[in-house]
Image: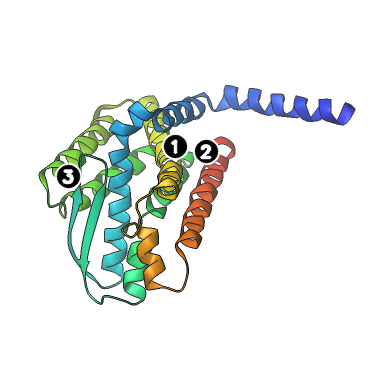
Amino acid sequence: MGDGTATVQRVVDTVTVLLDERPTVLLAAALALVAVSWTASWRWTRTVVTIAHEGGHALVAVVAGRGLTGIRLHSDTSGLTVSTGARRGPGLVFTFLGGYPAPSLLGVGGALLVAADHTALMLWIAIALLVATLAHVRNAYGVFAVLVTGALVGAVAWWGQPRLQDGFAAALCWFLLFGGLRAVHELQRSRRRGASDADMLGSLTWVPRGMWVLLFWLTAAAAVIVAAGVLLFG
């Protein structure tokens, strides 16, 4: 009984310290969690995760030496990145692999910058990535979605006070992290077979679809744990 009481007390003390020292980060996490968990808000904001997802495909395709034909973002929050090159092989495997981990890895990278008091730098890097993505978008809705996202981030980076920038940047990191988890959850529950990244990876390798989904789960969960440690205790 004594050990249990002591454990509860330590948890309460830790939460109290976090509320005193990291109120902005905790509020940002709560807002991001609501945005991702509430179906209505997720329907409107999921495109941000899709932008990161397709950007991951595009970046890996270029690094792998493939030709990047373009990116398309759709109003149903789906997306498509088209590249040219060999129809099999490591380059194509890594290109398909680059999508689902991208939001989570961006969230971790942003968290590291926010924790190091480089919030403004994090926001301007986000704008640079959005500009690079915009240059390869090939449909009207995609251009609109990237411009709106970039305008919001740019407004905060240019006119926002430091406290607003800190809160917005932390919320964006949390949103990418939680959004990365929900995207994998949706992939696992999807009844559509044959067209997802996990399906394509399964057909290109000897590793079955379920193992790729598990890898995406582990990556997204690890990213949340690492970023939480950095933002809350770093």
Q: Depth-wise, is mark 3 or mark 1 nearer the camera?
A: 3
- Image x and y of residue 7, in percent: 79, 30
**Residue at image x 48%, y 30%?**
29
Please state which of residues 35 and 233 is positioned toward the viewer in this rendering. 35
Q: CA distance from mark 3 to mark 1?
A: 23 Å
Q: Depth-wise, is mark 1 or mark 2 nearer the camera?
A: 1
Q: CA distance from mark 1 to mark 2?
A: 10 Å
Please state which of residues 28 and 116 is positioned toward the viewer in this rendering. 28
Density class for disc 2 (Cα within 10 Å; few <14, some 14-19, many ≥20) is many
Quadrant in the picture for the N terminus = top right
SS class of the residue under badge 3?
Answer: helix
Q: Are marks 1 and 2 in contact (CB under 8 Å)?
A: yes
The tag earlier along the polypeptide, 3 or 1, is 3
Tag shown at residue 1: none
* Disc 2: which residue: 231
Note whether 108 is above or below 32 in the view shown.
Answer: below
* Disc 1: which residue: 174
* Disc 3: which residue: 142
